[in-house]
């Protein structure tokens, strides 16, 4: 896995998300064999998205693994398939070790771990480890962020996300 900046998470600005599911499609294509939308829909098994767009009350949100510092999924994983990367602090999933017990799905406070019933393993955001970073420090290295037409998705630290939100609110007043 390529090295990433520590504590990077993907955040969703719920004031901008319109539920178009572009993030879901981009994620599935990124995790396909072909990396091409036309070929991916014919692949067996079909590529799986690792992000989910949901309506929560009157808001729409794109849900991603938050790579929790004290990750409940890692503690609940009986097979050792989930672990924390020492350098990046990302929550890593080893599909070869996954036994499909779904304990991680049950304990995830964000509902960000998805069951893949076909292969009987858990699937979660892996922060696009094989995707090239087209620009230094840009969230565009993440397929979902790059695909978002409303700029609702942001990759960075919590502090950077809050600063970005404040900047957007300041610009909308003018």
Image (cartoon, rainbow, N blue to C red):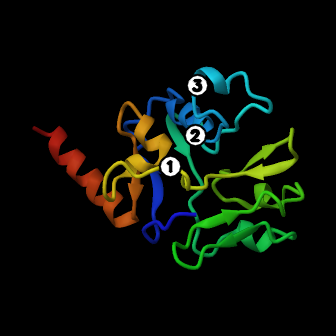
Badge number at residue 37:
3
Residue 112: x percent and y percent?
65, 51
Residue drawn where x is 77% and y is 60% of the image: 104
Which residue is at the front of the view, 67 or 174?
67
Horizontal side of 137 relative to 172 (left or right) equals right
Instruction: Tell me the quarter of the image containing the N terminus.
Output: bottom right
Among the two numbered marks 2 and 1 on one chain, the one whose residue lies closer to the N terminus: 2
Q: Secondary structure at mark 1?
A: loop
Q: Secondary structure at mark 2?
A: helix
Q: Secondary structure at mark 3?
A: helix
Horizontal side of 1 relative to 105 (left or right) equals left
The residue carrying mark 1 is: 131
Mark-to-mark CA distance, 1 and 3: 16 Å
Residue 53: x percent and y percent?
58, 36
* Crowd band around label 1 with a 10 angstrom C-alpha radius: few (<14), some (14–19), many (20+): some
**Mark 2–mark 1 contact, CB under 8 Å?**
yes
Residue drawn where x is 59% and y is 68% of the image: 68
Q: From this view, report whether residue 94 is shown above or below residue 40.
A: below
Mark-to-mark CA distance, 2 and 3: 9 Å
Q: In the picture, residue 171 is in which quadrant?
A: top left
Residue 23: x percent and y percent?
52, 36
Residue drawn where x is 81% and y is 71% of the image: 80
Residue 58: x percent and y percent?
51, 33
Among the two numbered marks 1 and 3 on one chain, the one whose residue lies closer to the N terminus: 3
Residue drawn where x is 63% and y is 42% of the image: 31
Badge number at residue 30:
2
* Crowd band around label 3 with a 10 angstrom C-alpha radius: few (<14), some (14–19), many (20+): some
Q: In the picture, residue 101 is in which quadrant?
A: bottom right
Q: How many marks?
A: 3
Q: In the picture, residue 21 is in which quadrant?
A: top right
């Amino acid at each position: 896995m390529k090295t990433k900046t520590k504590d990077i998470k993907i955040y969703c600005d719920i004031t901008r998300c319109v539920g178009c599911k572009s993030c879901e499609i981009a994620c599935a294509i990124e995790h396909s064999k072909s990396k091409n939308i036309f070929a991916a829909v014919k692949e067996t098994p079909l590529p799986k998205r690792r992000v989910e767009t949901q309506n929560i009350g009157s808001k729409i949100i794109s849900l991603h693994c938050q790579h929790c510092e004290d990750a409940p999924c890692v503690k609940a994983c009986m097979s050792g398939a989930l672990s924390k990367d020492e350098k990046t602090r990302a929550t890593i999933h080893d599909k070869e070790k996954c036994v499909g017990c779904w304990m991680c799905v049950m304990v995830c406070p964000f509902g960000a771990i998805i069951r893949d019933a076909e292969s009987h393993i858990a699937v979660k955001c892996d922060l696009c480890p094989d995707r090239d970073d087209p620009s230094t420090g840009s969230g565009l290295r993440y397929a979902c962020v790059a695909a978002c037409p409303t700029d609702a998705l942001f990759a960075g630290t919590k502090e950077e996300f809050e600063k970005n939100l404040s900047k957007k609110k300041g610009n909308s007043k003018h």
